[in-house]
Image (cartoon, coloured by chain):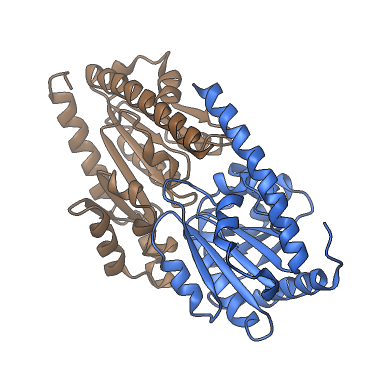
Chain colours: A blue, B brown
Amino acid sequence: MTYRLLEVQKSVLSKNAGLARDLRQRFADSGTFVVNLLSSPGAGKTTLLEETLRRLAPTHRAAALVGDQATDNDSLRLARAGVPVRQITTGAECRLDALMVGKALQDWLLADYDLLCIENVGNLICPAEYDLGEDLRVTLMSVTEGEDKPLKYPLAFNTAHTVIINKVDLALATGFDRAAARANIERVHPGVQVIELSARSGQGVDEWVQLIEERSSAKRAAPASV
Amino acid sequence: MTYRLLEVQKSVLSKNAGLARDLRQRFADSGTFVVNLLSSPGAGKTTLLEETLRRLAPTHRAAALVGDQATDNDSLRLARAGVPVRQITTGAECRLDALMVGKALQDWLLADYDLLCIENVGNLICPAEYDLGEDLRVTLMSVTEGEDKPLKYPLAFNTAHTVIINKVDLALATGFDRAAARANIERVHPGVQVIELSARSGQGVDEWVQLIEERSSAKRAAPASV
């Protein structure tokens, strides 16, 4: 039974890889810079994206996709930033996949957008296995979750281009051991970029927004090939 | 593809239901009260179990199983309470299932234990689908995760016998809206018991420990049939 399940999963992941390749080509053709944001439930993805989109909306043509098992709370929150937002309700599935993203974007003219932020389902396991054709995969952990999360969910941290440590305004109150957390991240993904910030207080958000600005400008300037 | 995956999943879940029924019978025969603890990563399962086992170890013959994708950090932490602890490393799987639990208990004489606490993999989605033969399923959320988690992960809250709101010592610092959280829990699972506590400060832990004591005594007193 387990063997059969593994075989089917392997085949699902290989189909996903093909669809993700197609998406990546579409994003290259349109010059759209795509961010895929992963974290546990409640680590602060939506608050960070709200703040990111609010800051970038005046100068960037931005949009967002939001994955959730149920409810459209997050898409309503993101829409407050004044950018187009589409909800993907995943039902029983614990992650977004390239097919869901492709369907959600079917009637969008991607050339109209410089930046697409994808908020994945709150989960540190399943989303890490699915490529969505993104340029930047960001795994976010909050100081309230404990320092060992990179060791316990290695794939999410190992496949991330950037790791964000969020809620640093609560570091003292929670007794967060910053050095231990950074050492654990470095252990599962040597050399990965780490940004410490608080989406709520704004501390450190400049560095994150600047990263998106630089990377999305660089993509628009590059020739459309992957 | 998705259809085939769903069919295989259905068959996996139905196999799990049979194995869980067998486990439930074994736990009834041995009079062992079994708790299955579910939450997001970092919501405080291990800290709460450490405190629970520390308090109950002098008067109860207790043991623990700990599921994690990787690392044995949590089983080392729980072993400090002085009770037998076995680690289940789930690898690619995002949850424990009845087969894993049965294998982990294979060489244990269950009649030696009044209480078995199972710490599931940190995930609010997959573990909710798998019955482990437990007497008490507890879903734990922390105030740092936000009030909407019950709406976003309805199955985890709907299948719980008891919901714990943890880290109430951080409620003020995080701006936690207690009334909204309780209303959301009530909405997905009307009438479910809710315990508010802080595993770190000890506030409210008495009520939780008392619940375990009462329920495990009642099970030992009951005739061994299910």
Q: Quadrant of the N terminus of chain B?
A: top right
The answer to whether one can see residue A135 in this image is no
Residue at image coords 31%, 35%: B35
Q: Residue at x 49, y 21 (%)?
A: A1
Which residue in the rendered view is the most extreme toward the bottom?
A58
> Which quadrant, please, contains the C terminus of chain B?
top left
Q: Is residue A77 visible?
A: yes
Tell whether B37 sits left or right of A94: left
A197 and B214: which is toward the camera: A197
Res. A137 image quadrant:
bottom right
Q: Measured from the top left, where is residue B182 in percent x and y?
A: 26, 62
Q: Position of residue B56 (x, y in %)?
A: 30, 36
Q: Residue furthest right?
A: A223
Q: Quadrant of residue B25?
A: top left
Q: Position of residue B124 (x, y in %)?
A: 42, 48
Q: Please say if A54 is above or below A208.
A: below
Q: Nearer the viewer, residue A225 or B48?
A: A225
Q: Is residue A191 left or right of residue A20?
A: right
- Which residue is located at x 18 percent, y 24 percent? B220
Q: Report the label total.
A: 0
B69 or A176: nearer the eye? Answer: B69
Residue B101 vertical placement versus B76 (above, below)? above
As displayed, is residue A108 above or below residue A11? below
Place of residue B23 in the rendered image (x, y in percent of width and height, measured from the top left) = 32, 21
